[in-house]
Amino acid sequence: MWIFLPNGMNMAAWRPPAQSAALSPTLEPLTRHKKQLLILEGLAITAGTAGADGAGDHARAASTFLTCTRAKKTDGADIRCGVSVDQFAAAAAGASMPFPSLQVGTEQGRLAGGCDSGYSCAYSNSVSWSAPDTPCGKETSPRRLFERLFGAVDAAGDVRARELAAARRKSILDWLLEDARSLQGRLGTEDRRTLERWLESLRSLEKRVAADAKAQSGMPEPELVLRGPGSYTERVDLMYLLSARALAGNQTRLVTFMAGNAGSNRPFPEVAWRDGHHDTSHHGGNAEKLAAIARINRWHMERLAGFLDTLATEETSKGTLLDHTMVLAGCGISDGDRHNHDDLPVLLAGGQGLGVKSGQHRVLKPTPMANLHLAMLRKLDIDVDAFADSTEALALDA
């Protein structure tokens, strides 16, 4: 799981205090998972820097986050970036899954036209690239994601077809129960219990998704996600939970999650802040704006903590799902005011069952972000010598 967070961080609030075992104020919501965290300082994405291209740091922050490859500066059809680490992994290890990879987000966004200082919207609104000229679209609707994952209708069908199919069924899971009962009779005791837990969790999840859809039934689908107090938090939590269920149910092994598009200017009434996130990130040292950024960053960590909770409670034959899942979360820029692409705020959660030595805060010398991507590919048993501008695989078991 790769999670992209927009607009950088309040780095003073993010960075763990020196010579202390405590987490920083931003990371404090993750305290219950502290032993499963590897907090990394010193990672950099050289391809994100301006070079000769000038402005456009937010577009570069997203487009290079998982590719570590410089994006061609264009707002036309001749876009070009690199293959992202999730798609590199999908080509090698995802073919046996119902979904070789899954792209999820919280904000809709175009993949054409200009969005950032001469850069195509494709660069700002996607972190996943299956080919240098092919960004992967992401699903931002909890209901559509649920239907896509758990079987009612083809998500590519037209809206009317989906509505008719939904009307014909009382519940997606009711439609599946007959097959499930037949399967249960052929399973051993442990597998039957696993299937029962899976069906119970899906039914609970379906009710939450249905409630979310009902709350929005009288509204047109907005260009951006809902902005009402509380509703956006629930939407984001649902997308995280659906991602967790997809991993738990072996629907996919690989998920990218854009917790906001690059340069997102969504206000955050959820943390008592009405100004746009991107505008606020240009804080100029203003104490009030810096405090607001810290609250927004902490809100994102609260959402992440809930996701890790779900993975940690999902038992497998070899431990928890969190033990066997690497969750990378971070930004493609560090300080939103400076637009710097070095000393990035990055953490890696979980993966202890894959050999990741967690419970650490490591301060690295300047290190390519691609070194971390390369290390993660190898932990997935993908035989690869290099990735993008990597110099060596980052030691995750040190």
Image: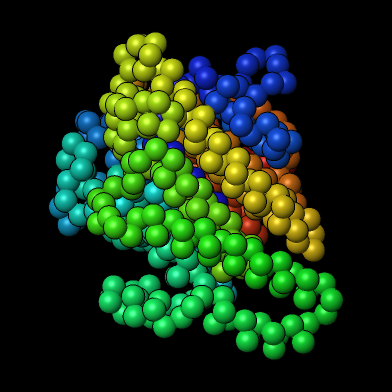
Location of the C terminus by quadrant is top right
Determine the residue positioned at 58% across, 22% down: 25
Determine the residue positioned at 41% across, 83% down: 168
Q: Give x and y (percent) for residue 207.
A: 53, 62
The answer to whether residue 105 is visible is: yes
Q: Count numbered badges in the picture.
A: 0
In this view of the protein, which residue sits in the foreground, 256 or 389? 256
Q: Give x and y (percent) for residue 138.
A: 37, 58
> From what the image shows, is residue 201 above or below residue 358?
below
Left or right: residue 69 versus residue 160 is: right
- Quadrant position of residue 220: bottom left
In this view of the protein, which residue sits in the foreground, 169 or 10? 169
The answer to whether residue 253 is visible is: no
- Quadrant position of residue 264: top left
Determine the residue positioned at 66% across, 27% down: 361
In this view of the protein, which residue sits in the foreground, 289 or 91? 289
Q: Give x and y (percent) for residue 210.
A: 46, 63
> From what the image shows, is residue 177 above or below residue 236?
below
Determine the residue positioned at 20% across, 54% down: 112
In this view of the protein, which residue sits in the foreground, 89 or 250? 250
